Amino acid sequence: MEWFKTLNWAGVLEWLNTIVASLSQLLATAGVPEEYRPLAAFGLLYLGVTVVVLLFVLLLLKLLRKGKKPQTDEEVVAVEPEPEPEPEPEPEPEPEPEPEPEPTPGVLERFKNGLAKTQSSLVGRVDNLLRGRTSIDGDLIEDLEEILITADLGMATTQQLIKTLESSRSKGELASPDQVRQLLMEELAKILRFEGQQLDVTSAAPFVIMVVGVNGVGKTTTIGKLANQFARDGKKVVLGAGDTFRAAAAEQLQIWGERADVEVVCNVEGGDPSAVAFDAAKAAVARKADILLLDTAGRLHTKVNLMEELKKIRRVLDREIPGAPHEVLLVLDATTGQNALTQAKLFNEAVPLDGIALTKLDGTAKGGIVVAIAAELQIPVRFVGIGEQLDDLRPFDAEMFVSVLFDTK
Ligand SMILES: Nc1nc2c(ncn2[C@@H]2O[C@H](COP(=O)(O)OP(=O)(O)OP(=O)(O)O)[C@@H](O)[C@H]2O)c(=O)[nH]1
Ligand SMILES: [Mg+2]
């Protein structure tokens, strides 16, 4: 307040007087009558001072805002929202993080996920039985027998496995739980392994695959997945829509054909499936295709006339392409368990089967059926379906299957 007292008020008044006088002169030149000039001059002075004070306040606010940078989160919260926030300086662009690897799990992991239910119904129970055992006795083998049967390995296969276990035990080769586990793995792989397990489509051109099976097991889906994989491998593929029975069956195959970018040969709905087989075989030869995949209508294995129809299709194919079909692939749905064995036996009687595609392993605890199929039918399992995605049909590999099944870590 000291400065206030020491201020030269007389000087200030004189200075104001000078300004008012100059303003009056200015007003005179603007034609303002003399009696209004002092009032107008004061008015102008008042306005001018107000503008200067306002500008000063604004400048002060701006300076304050610049100087005050919040340091902590609490301070940020405490800061009053500002009427016109200064645009924050653009933060330094963070270096782009390396793109995450695709979340699609690897083949082994997909297999493991697909076999999870079968694993717990078979290996999980075997491990529970073996846990904490120091010796292997007859009771344990009996309990093991029950587990194998209920895990859909089938009576005959289970008996065969139990016989091997018993004979090892009597020779003193089965002293620890680990040895039981190991022997089971070896024996299962032995049953599942086949000479020429993988389908070799290079042995003929066009290589004709006729796909058969009961309703809804996954024939068309399997054809779609195979077509995609073959096409991706650079093969020229033709599809034959031999299911003329079910409405929209040809459309379903056509969608798969579009996805794989391969030709689909169709005929009228309700037409003769042998005629489709004929047209498809002709088209495959004309286009110099590497592979012809022929879909057929789902049929009950117990319906004799329908099984006869398959024989006719087979004959037609053979007439057009000698030696065809090179592969009659039976599609079985793993969720049907032991019923799949009956289907396979009856189909095999009508049209000798070359291989099996076991679908829907992902949705079932009955995956042990694959062992029963291989052991009792002596037909190689070529493919297994572990889901509905394009890549979820995998070539079957006995060693891999067993090691994934017993990998409980
Ligand atoms: N989870 C799962 N589903 C599958 C698998 N394979 C096929 N499916 C499903 O099974 C259902 C039937 O498949 P389709 O291919 O139409 O069966 P289809 O044998 O051709 O049937 P029909 O022509 O009617 O005899 C579809 O919903 C498929 O997505 C698999 O491996 N896993
Ligand atoms: Mg179908």
Image (cartoon, rainbow, N blue to C red):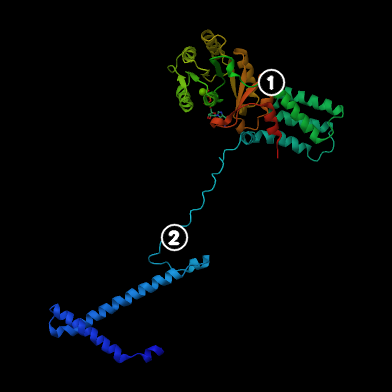
Q: Earlier in the sequence, mark 2 or mark 1?
A: 2
Crowding near the residue tagged with mark 1, few <14, some 14–19, many ≥20 C-alpha atoms within 10 Å:
some
Q: Please determine whether, in this image, residue 51 is positioned above or below residue 270.
A: below
Residue 264: x and y in percent read 46, 20
Q: Residue type at mark 2?
A: Pro
Q: Would you identify the image quadrant in which residue 177 lies?
A: top right
**Rendered image: mark on residue 89:** 2
Q: Would you identify the image quadrant in which residue 371 lies?
A: top right
Spatial CA distance of label 2 from label 1 is: 69 Å
Q: Residue at x 48, y 56 (%)?
A: 92
Check disc 1 and report its element: helix, strand or loop. loop
Check disc 2 and report its element: helix, strand or loop. loop
Q: Residue at x 29, y 75 (%)?
A: 51
Q: Please determine whether, in this image, residue 302 is positioned above or below residue 35.
A: above
Residue 314: x and y in percent read 55, 11
Tell me the quarter of the image containing the N terminus.
bottom left
Q: Residue at x 46, y 13 (%)?
A: 286
Residue 289: x and y in percent read 50, 17
Q: Which residue is mark 1?
A: 194
Q: Nearer the viewer, mark 2 or mark 1?
A: 2
Q: Is residue 152 left or right of residue 72?
A: right
Q: Residue type at mark 1?
A: Phe
Instruction: Tell me, yes or no, if residue 350 can be seen here.
Output: yes
Work out whether residue 386 or residue 351 is closer to the camera in this orientation and state it: 386
